[in-house]
Image (cartoon, rainbow, N blue to C red):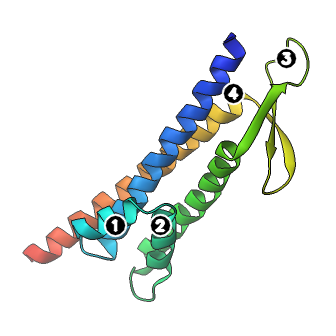
Amino acid sequence: MDEARDELVKGIGEVCISASSLEWSLAYLTSVVRYRGNDDKFVEIASTPGAPLKEFRKTVRSPGALQAPEQAEAEKILADAERLLEDRNRVVHSAIMDELEPDSRLYDAWHAKSNSIWSVDPIYLNNLARDLKQCVAAADAFGTAWEERAEDARLA
């Protein structure tokens, strides 16, 4: 494989790994907030395709599940996760085609669901992977803070 294709493959791999981490974090966060840390619910959510985002959305939108400041933060995490995972879906469910132009570093991709062709650039893939990782960090920080508050309330 040539260098440009190697970068493309690496970028797609980074997007997939980062998206999996985000789904894991959303499953964890849902199990902590909605199911009080129930490990069985975590495994159930994490092991079902599409469930981490769906269950996190239900948790965030459940009346009384979160207080106002937490609600705003959870809504931001949800909006970011929805957008980023949709971008991941477009990447992994597209057919990558040969270079647009000879000696170009860009490739075309066809996304069947939207019937759209888009240019794939490794820089875009790297940025998407980075943004997914940032969303993971926000979700993990939210979950850690939630667990600390729950523990403080339990000890009080």
Sequence-first tag of 4 and 1? 1
Instruction: State the SS at label 2.
Output: helix
The residue drawn where x is 38% and y is 82% is 65
The mark found on residue 44 in the picture is 1
The residue labelled by disc 4 is 122
Sequence-first tag of 3 and 1? 1
Task: Tell me where residue 18 appears, x and y as whole percent.
Answer: 49, 42
Circle 2 Cα neighbour tier, 10 Å, few/some/many (<14 / 14–19 / ≥20): some
Sequence-first tag of 2 and 4? 2
The residues bearing labels 2 and 1 have C-alpha atoms spaced at a distance of 9 Å
Circle 1 Cα neighbour tier, 10 Å, few/some/many (<14 / 14–19 / ≥20): few
Q: Quadrant of residue 125?
A: top right
The residues bearing labels 3 and 2 have C-alpha atoms spaced at a distance of 39 Å
Contact, mark 2 vs mark 4 (Cβ under 8 Å): no
Circle 3 Cα neighbour tier, 10 Å, few/some/many (<14 / 14–19 / ≥20): few
Contact, mark 2 vs mark 1 (Cβ under 8 Å): yes
The residues bearing labels 3 and 4 have C-alpha atoms spaced at a distance of 12 Å
- Label 4 is placed on what type of residue? Pro
The residue labelled by disc 2 is 51
Circle 4 Cα neighbour tier, 10 Å, few/some/many (<14 / 14–19 / ≥20): many
The mark found on residue 104 in the picture is 3
Sequence-first tag of 3 and 2? 2
Instruction: State the SS at label 4.
Output: helix
